[in-house]
Image (tube, rainbow, N blue to C red):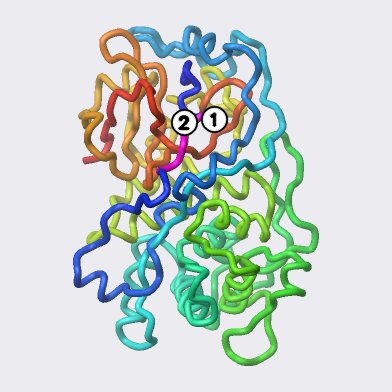
Amino acid sequence: MTSGETETESSTAPGPGSTAPATAPHARRRLAALLALATAVVLAAGVITVVQLTPAPAGDTGAAAAAADGAAAGRQAPGPGSTPASGQTPQPESTPQPTSSRPARDVPQEQGTRFEAWVDEVAGWLDIPRPAMHAYATATVRMEKEKPGCNLSWVTLAGIGRTTSDHGREGDRTLTRDGTPTSPIGTIELRNFAGDVISQEGAEGPLQLSPAVWQQWAATSAGDVPNIQDIDDAALTAGRALCDGGRDLDQGQQWLAGVSALHDEPLFLHRVLATANVYGTVGMQDEPPNEKVLRAVTFAIEKIGLPYVWGGNGTEQGDAGFDCSGLTTAAYASAGVSLERTAHWQYSSLPIIGPDEQPRLGDLVFFGDPDTKIHHVGMYIGNQQMIDAPTFGQAVQVHNYRKPGDSYAGAGRPVA
């Protein structure tokens, strides 16, 4: 379904001085005392705007989509392969624009039993290989000493690692105990939804660092010759590139500039942002995440960049992309949870959390009038952000879930 009001295009991030959600209890803060919880990477205090994946089409196409996309109560969305009433096709991605703030989560600064226990716990919760989690945490601690004003978070490094190579597991590889993949990782092909190759030529290793980044910032965590295939060295190198020029990654625009220095592509930025938001949100909790929720959210992140398709149910069902409720339906179906197909029916069938309550990770956030028509739905990923398929001419993407004057109707919780 489409927003009809382009709910997110003009959303603003939290204003300066806004903070991430409350940190975990004192015991956890002591255990995790250094690696800032990055519950939102590129969404800082009103400083960065959404990195929009595709330009909004001219005219009131959002309203036209809302009227035609089957979101009204009692009306089933069109089947796979249906044609949008507007006949418009998605446009190429636009250049990143200023947006909001970044994530945070503390890591024990000193090496030893507490550090290792923290690494084991978080790696297990988030399905991050232990050598990778150790590399992200160690690089964060190292950069805290080298560039304390940078405020680098492990969540940023982990978001990059997941987006580039699934933490070194690309192509059925695994990471060995020394942090290198079972076979060298060359350039991994990355395409945008238009089919254009946007991989960086010559990029290598688990973080897909470009030759230019490696040449300028190559570093080793062990005092020997830097190895781009070693995730410890790659994480530290990425950290130095992110912190270059005195950047403060607590500031949204500077976070965006730092990640763009590694790979300046909107698709890459959105996926890193979404992943870091999720990792930061989970990292703040005292209990492991619900596996079904995490699976659904991960599915949605992997679909970032696919086009909005009216009635679309995704490539798995033969469509090029999704509409808004097609995305949420498919995401939860991947986790074994069945949802109604339209936004209005999803709203009517789920336990609803009121507009004054804070959504949780994986909640569905709804827009419209419950008495007449819920016309849009997205998936909450933490730090005031959602993933959704907005409208014609745009791709699945990340942005703020609220804006002044919106028609937010509350959140539904598919998994208790």
| Residue beneath the point at 47% across and 40% down | 300
> Which contiguous range is marked in magenta?
9-14
Circle 2 residue:
327
Three-letter amino acid code at the position of disc 1: Gly
- Mark 1 highlights which residue? 314
Residue at left 50%, top 22%? 6
Q: Where is residue 363 in the image (x, y as percent from the top left)?
A: 31, 37
In the image, residue 95 lies at what x, y percent? 69, 40
N-term-proximal mark, 1 vs 2: 1
Residue 219: where, in percent of width, then height? Answer: 65, 81
* Alpha carbons under labels 1 and 2: distance apart: 7 Å
Nearer to us of marks 1 and 2 is 2
Task: Report the side of 139 relative to 119 (left or right).
Answer: right
Viewer-closest of 60 and 268:
60
Regarding mark 2 in the picture, which secondary structure is present there? Answer: helix
Q: Which mark is residue 189?
A: none
